[in-house]
Image (cartoon, rainbow, N blue to C red):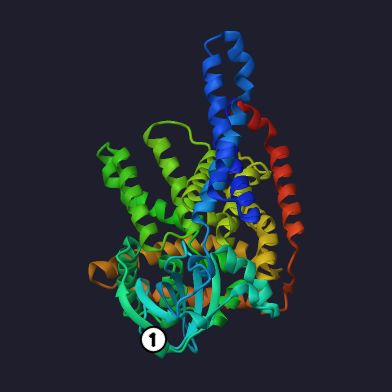
Amino acid sequence: MHRGPLIPVVSLAAGITLSKIVELPWWFGAIFIVPAIALYAYILTASNNPVAAFKWGKWHILWVILLFLGIGVTDESLSRPISLEKSYDGIVPASIYCEVTGVLTKTYGERIDVKIDGTNGAKARIRTGVKEVSPGDIIRIPSNRLKEVASDTTEIGRKIMPMMKASGILYSGSIMPKYIEVVGKSNNLRYFFAGIRERIETKIERSHLSKPTSDFLNAILMGDKNGLNEKQRLTFAHGGMAHMLALSGLHIGILASFLLLIMWPIKLLGHYKWGYMLALVLLWFYVAVTGMAYSSVRACIMTTFAFIGIIAERKNFAGNALFSACLLILIIDPGALFNAGFQLSVVCVGSLIAFATQLNPIGHRSHPKLFVICGALITTMIATGASWVLTSYYFSQVPLMFLPANFVLLPLLPIYLSFAVVFVAALCLGFEIGWIGSILDLGYAGLLKSVEWLSCGTEFVVDYQIPLWGVLFWMLLLSLGAYIVNRKDLKKVMN
């Protein structure tokens, strides 16, 4: 019986969740791992006898569950952020060192995210007027200016606290520039790629594009939404188009298709496999430069499995690719399980795999064009229908105009992105294609006007935060529906 990585990833997620809720110590994972190894060894020994092998074969699933439960517990415990009080045994020094991980320009100055030294990755979000810091800087700040996010009892504080803690942000505060001292620079490889991104963004900003267009390109191509003002963000959010601003599977898919297109000379020479491998290298370089966002990493891992399947001339099951991507991400960063972006990415893609083809009433071979049109509408409905509970839970809003906005505008995104990629690639080579820049300016202006018109501002936005039990119930219904729709195919895959 073959279930692929589904059982391991569910077990791993269960172990991470258990450890997170109960705050288990790292060694507690051995309670699951040791019996798993012992059971596997026993089954392996018993397999020498054909009768015993048949009898114990069905118990293979048990040791897999126990093993990944234990890995999840241990992994989460070892990567769990530690509070300042625990890190310094209750005596927190007057000054602490931090590594700047993100900078967001606001009207009052900068909002910086920092990772606190000696706390196993605990983060703080600081409001400040300082203008001289950048990601990768090592700074020294006064510890008494930070307070736990859990202590914020305001209404907005209670809403955003779960999301902040899920991202490892345990502290927040407001610190004047004179109390922030830059003392060094991190040698982390991540900031090497961040430097490349910064140089590309500078080229985009110095081009003849209008500022709104250059800010939009930096968001959808480079993953940097800092340049977008509040009005632009809210316009896309109210129209149910906020996902367009985040690097996701859609963007990675479009870029992968574009890379394969420009690899056609290699294919003509009969070395198409080298084209796929080169496209993968460029795709991973792009993901590294754009910040390794969970959604783009997940999409790139899935694309990697798909390309490897083509290179090895093997069939690729999209569900297995998704589960494998989740498994790798959660092992490397167990905190991703509680990240809103990761959850939205997995739920949307999983729902599309489970429902998109099965619910399309048009046959692909009989009416291919109608199949694509109908598929676009169904894809929009499925992705939004699956993810609305998470949007409501994390952002306390439900946009009602998502369907017409996505159905009308989303199919145009691949065309716009293709022009944008060519334009930015030319900028990196040292020249600017003016007529493409004009198309990008006109295209973004038209897009923004269309989203504003379709969303009608806040008129069709419901302010509602669904309770956690409602999210869990909806996810249970989705899982049940996916099983019912795909039960025949699942039996074929699992046998």
Question: Total label count?
Answer: 1
Q: Position of residue 359 (x, y in %)?
A: 68, 44
Q: Residue at x 32, y 43 (%)?
A: 277
Quarter holding the N terminus?
top right
Q: Secondary structure at mark 1?
A: loop
The answer to which of 52 and 339 lies nearer the viewer is: 52
The answer to which of 83 and 258 lies nearer the viewer is: 83
The answer to which of 145 and 212 lies nearer the viewer is: 145
Q: Residue at x 65, y 55 (%)?
A: 21
Residue 374 in view (yes/no): no
In the rendered structure, the answer to whether residue 485 lies left or right of residue 379 reads: right
* Dot 1 alpha-carbon crowd within 10 angstroms: few under 14, some 14 to 19, many 20 or more: few
In the rendered structure, the answer to whether residue 386 lies left or right of residue 175 reads: right
Image-quadrant location for residue 159: bottom right
Q: Is residue 83 above or below residue 252?
A: below
Q: Residue at x 44, y 50 (%)?
A: 300
Q: Position of residue 156 (x, y in %)?
A: 67, 78
- Tag 1: residue type? Lys
In the rendered structure, the answer to whether residue 405 lies left or right of residue 186 reads: right
Considering every residue shown, the one lying at the far left of the view is 430
In the rendered structure, the answer to whether residue 429 lies left or right of residue 235 reads: left
Q: Position of residue 450 (x, y in %)?
A: 59, 74
Q: Is residue 444 above or below residue 478?
A: below
Q: Which residue is mark 1?
A: 131
Residue 457 in view (yes/no): yes
Q: Position of residue 389 (x, y in %)?
A: 70, 60
Quarter holding the C terminus?
top right
Q: Residue at x 32, y 38 (%)?
A: 273
